[in-house]
Amino acid sequence: MAGEGEKKPVLEMVQADGADDGCVTFVMHDEDHTLGNSLRYMIMKNPEVEFCGYTITHPSESKINFRIQTRGGIPAVEPLRSGLNDLHDVCQHVLNTFQVQPGAVFCCNVVLQMNITSYLWEKKVNYASI
């Protein structure tokens, strides 16, 4: 647990004792359905993923439990990493597609852009540490 003055982690990995690396729950702090559902969709497109789902622990808490189970001994962090990258690419494509002209205001859903792009870049998620 983060003490006073310490920054709490953005992403935690929770794994049962003795469980393999292909079945992991990731706890994502300060996130909601916007990231949860879109990331779940991107990860489920991977044929090596057997199960992917998320829950919001409680309406008053801003964290989600994100569960990934893979086939064939693939570590669960691999689909998470590729899903985050794919989702970033999709958001970038939307931004580029709906950009009226250089320097103009984007015709994009600001909430989606802020939640996903800020999760990936402003919080500086270090993929190597996942």
Image (cartoon, rainbow, N blue to C red):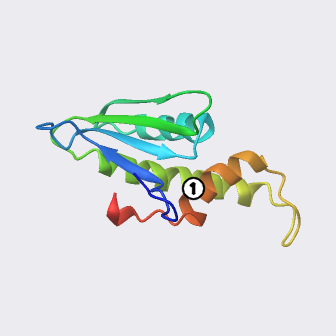
Taking the image as shown, residue 4 lies to the left or right of residue 59, namely left
Residue 118 in which image quadrant: bottom right
Give neighbour class at mark 1: few <14, some 14-19, many 20+ (Cα, 10 Å).
many
Residue 114 or residue 42, whichever sits in front: 114
The residue at the far left in this view is 18
Image x and y of residue 44, in percent: 41, 34
- The residue positioned 70% from the left and 52% from the top of the image is 113
Q: Residue at x 58, y 39 (%)?
A: 62
Q: Secondary structure at mark 1?
A: helix
Q: Is residue 115 above or below residue 34?
A: below
Horizontal side of residue 21 vs 42, given as left or right: left
Find the residue positioned furthest to the bottom.
103
Residue 103, horizontal then vertical, whole percent: 86, 72
Judge by depth and name the residue closer to the eye, 83 or 55: 55
Quadrant of the rendered image containing residue 121: bottom right
Left or right of residue 37: residue 44: left
Picture residue at 47% right of the left edge, 52% below the top: 84
Q: Position of residue 5 (x, y in %)?
A: 52, 65
Instruction: Looking at the picture, tell me which residue is in the foreground, 92 or 10.
Output: 10
Vertical arrangement, residue 128 with respect to residue 46, above or below: below
Q: Measured along the vertical axis of the image, is residue 118 above or below residue 101?
A: above
Q: Position of residue 112 (x, y in %)?
A: 69, 46
Q: Amino acid at mark 1?
A: Tyr
Q: Give the residue pinned by disc 1.
A: 119
Q: Quadrant of the C terminus?
A: bottom left
